[in-house]
Amino acid sequence: NAGVTQTPKFQVLKTGQSMTLQCAQDMNHEYMSWYRQDPGMGLRLIHYSVGAGITDQGEVPNGYNVSRSTTEDFPLRLLSAAPSQTSVYFCASSATGTNQPQHFGDGTRLSIL
Amino acid sequence: GENVEQHPSTLSVQEGDSAVIKCTYSDSASNYFPWYKQELGKRPQLIIDIRSNVGEKKDQRIAVTLNKTAKHFSLHITETQPEDSAVYFCAVSRGDMRFGAGTRLTVKP
């Protein structure tokens, strides 16, 4: 099993550009989420999904869109990149239920110039 | 929303000493409390977790204690080793998972 796979690993964008960060899991997990990690601020929840067709906002959703058309995939879209979105982005998944451990991908390091 | 506070932000200990990291949370409906370890440039990885119906859990040199009344839980690492050096995150879940800001632990040989 590959677990949680994120692509790309690194990306540089110019301000105003849009892009999609990909996340796929092969564990048949219902719950998936996106976090951003900035120095000294831990992991902040952007969006999450409890199953296909269902998404909800986390702590810092502005500037990001998500969709969940399949159980396996949970892409994160930056609509118009801003320097404040420079960060490391982690996707995670867990089995159904509120008290299950999350499995993280390797992260995408994103720089906005 | 849930507010998770983690202390200290940095912790330095001598090899063989114990390390304790504490987290407090605000939402009494939270029912799952994991701890993650993150080495430089790597993904966070689960090291231990506890659910709200349990007060303490141990796994070799690592233990977690939970006080639901006071809304705090702690990570205890005994007999620390240099390979324990990393950033540790607590998290709290009541449907969505929120993380503390992290503790950078340095174990000096």
Image (tube, rainbow, N blue to C red):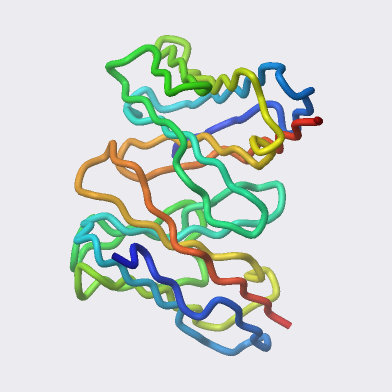
Give the quadrant of residue B57: top left
A93 lies above or below A6: above
Q: Residue at x 21, y 42 (%)?
A: A97
Q: Is residue B30 left or right of residue A12?
A: left
Picture residue at 27% right of the left edge, 55% below the top: A31
Residue A57 picture location, percent across and down: 38, 57
Image position, residue B15 (x, y; %):
75, 24
Instruction: Reply above or below: A56 against A5.
Output: above
Q: Horizontal and vertical percent for residue A29?
A: 23, 57
Residue B69 vs residue B45, the one in the foreground: B45
A24 or A89: nearer the eye?
A24
B54 over A97 or under it: above or below: above
Residue B43 coordinates in the image, percent (x, y): 53, 56
Quadrant in the picture for the N terminus of chain B: top left
User: Where A24 sits versus B27, above or below?
Assistant: below
Instruction: Name the residue: 34% across, 63% down.
Output: A3
Q: Residue at x 60, y 38 (%)?
A: B88
Q: Nearer the viewer, residue B11 or B80?
A: B80
Q: Is residue B36 left or right of residue A27?
A: right
- Left or right of B49 in this view: A80: right
Q: Quadrant of residue A113?
A: bottom right
* On-image quarter of the C terminus of chain B: top right
How many numbered circles are shown? Answer: 0
